[in-house]
Amino acid sequence: MRAIIGKLGRLVLHGLQSTGRGALLLRSIVFQLPHAWSMRRETSEQMQIVSVGSLPLVVTTSVFVGAVTAVQAVYQMQAYVPMKFLGTVISKSVFIELGPVLIALVVGSRLCANYAAELGTMKVTEQLDAMNIMAIDPVRYLALPRFLAAVLMIPVITVLANTIAVVGGYVASVLTLDVTSSTFIEGLKMFYKHSDLMGGLIKSFFFGGIIAMSGIYYGFNTEGGAEGVGKATMTAVVGSCLSVLVADYFLAIILFQIVFRS
Amino acid sequence: MATNEKWVIPPPPVQRVENPAEFQGIVLEGVSKAFGPKVVLKQADLLIAKGETIVIIGRSGQGKSVLLKNIVRLMEPDEGLIWIEGEEVTSMRRGDLMELRKSFGFLFQGAALFDSMTICKNVGLMLEEHTDMTPAQIRARACECLALVGLEGSDDKLPSELSGGMKKRAGLARAIVMKPRYILYDEPTTGLDPITSDAITDLILKLQRELGVTSIVVTHDMPSAYKVADRIAMLSRGKIVFSGSVAEVRSTTHPMVRQFIEGSATGPLGAF
Ligand SMILES: Nc1ncnc2c1ncn2[C@@H]1O[C@H](COP(=O)(O)OP(=O)(O)OP(=O)(O)O)[C@@H](O)[C@H]1O
Ligand SMILES: [Mg+2]
């Protein structure tokens, strides 16, 4: 029992320490923001890696998320709730929660692993040292473009995913669940609120930051050879996913209890 | 160590100056560095005069690479001070340090090429970042440097497409592209065939004669060391234990140096 508490304590301390040092890294990235324009080529390269490379993943995830939401909603609503609310349920759950969070988990893990492994390999093969000795700041040259790419592209991907998921839900409803097209669309429009979509997008903006910071931080702090890179990648992905879920709760409180409260 | 009792080890050379802030060149004063319990540098002193080529020899794992990295603050020494042209490096602000580093070339033992960039981009990156040269000018200068190390025609290859020796030479081209005043070579000829090795040795000599660079060369390759060195220093057990000209090295009776240059397994350095 004591051992478990001790281990938990160390884990919490480690988490806090990483958060603190991550905050310092974030600060130095923010200080480099004035150089963003000069790093536009590298940034757009990273944006392509984030977006184009993720497309198959995004499409598959979103279609099935939309479809399964439809199936589950119909199952739970049967006989109690009129089917005209189906479109409402699907669009709300996708815009507010499923879209942003699932994209942050699925695309985010892909991205975070990419950042951590690439930067970690550069660290252990002395490429970061080489950059430093060439008087090129790795934070500006490597971290800034990756951070910007994630923060800008994750919301864009989320919008795309939201759309595809609603279409997936629609197709599943109409083809397999005996809901007519007009009923579905009526529900979709009925309770649509701008703030739902906006809230989800604001969340995904923060998720983009969390994903990038986790990958960059663990990449830059990799020690040891191939094993170290593996460990850093694993820690980065786990850290990113957990932080996204925790942040999701707090952002939900801030956004939907305070900011968008009607 | 018990083996030491059989050999008379002369006292280490004096490598200190009265006023390091006025010394033209590099001064290391009492530099120590340990990794956990493993002490690598122990109060090491070293003077490197401007324009000089100093070769540092020493057995594998004695801390030669660590010494080089401490000079340019890729590693922070645990204690001790380092002056470069009168400026103290260990307490320098980051901006000044970055400025100072522009006058340094560093050849890594493992080349450390950026593996996502072509060789040409690797070599030209510093010019791209720190000068106003046009892309065409940068490319021309990069190709010129690559030709100096015998790598013409490989500019658009990726580092993974090069052999070990070619990577080393590309790393050297990258180190000299900004015409640095100081070049730190970590084993420039290791892994090269004898002919290329001699050509690189000649290049080091040429850079020193034509541009007046100050060089620190870490090497195990004694023919190359004899050819380029103004002075040879030996690092052992965390300190500089010997320093002398090529002639002095050849004729020395210092048992550690003798053992090293003769490549003998018996001596004060031990076999392992
Ligand atoms: N980052 C590090 N972390 C821990 N120990 C290190 C690190 N870098 C070097 N060392 C240790 O410091 C010692 C000196 O290493 P260094 O690379 O300077 O040796 P070297 O003299 O350059 O050897 P070689 O001729 O084989 O290159 C070694 O024992 C090594 O284990
Ligand atoms: Mg070495």
Image: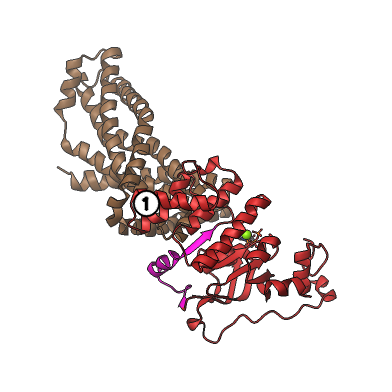
Chain colours: A brown, B red
- Identify which residue is drawn at 36% across, 42% down: A46
In reply to whether residue A193 is colored magenta, the answer given is no
Q: Quarter-wise, where is residue A35 in the image?
A: bottom left
Q: Quadrant of the C terminus of chain A?
A: top left
Percent across and percent down for residue A65 are: 34, 27
In reply to whether residue B93 is colored magenta, the answer given is yes
Q: Which residues are magenta?
A: B87-107
Whether the residue carrying mark 1 lies under 8 Å from ligand 2 is answered with no
| Element assignment for label 1 | helix
Camera-side residue of A192 and A208: A208
**Side (left or right) of A157 relative to A143:** left
- Residue identified by numbered label 1: B137
Most extreme residue toward the bottom is B18
Q: How many marks can you see?
A: 1
Camera-side residue of A2 and B55: B55
Q: Is residue A222 visible?
A: no
User: Quick check: which quadrant has ligand 1?
Assistant: bottom right
Percent across and percent down for residue B197 are: 64, 54
Kindly identify the amino acid type of the residue bearing the numbered disc 1: Gln
Q: Is residue A211 visible?
A: yes
Q: Looking at the image, is B70 positioned above or below residue A34?
A: below
Q: Looking at the image, is B74 positioned above or below residue A190?
A: below
Query: Dot 1: within a 10 Å radius of its alpha carbon, few (fewer than 14), some, or many (20 or more) residues?
Result: some
Percent across and percent down for residue B18 are: 55, 87
**Side (left or right) of B32 relative to A233:** right
Percent across and percent down for residue A213 are: 38, 50
Camera-side residue of B167 and A99: B167
- Identify which residue is drawn at 59% across, 72% down: B32
Q: Quarter-wise, where is residue B255 in the image?
A: bottom right
- Identify which residue is drawn at 76% across, 75% down: B252
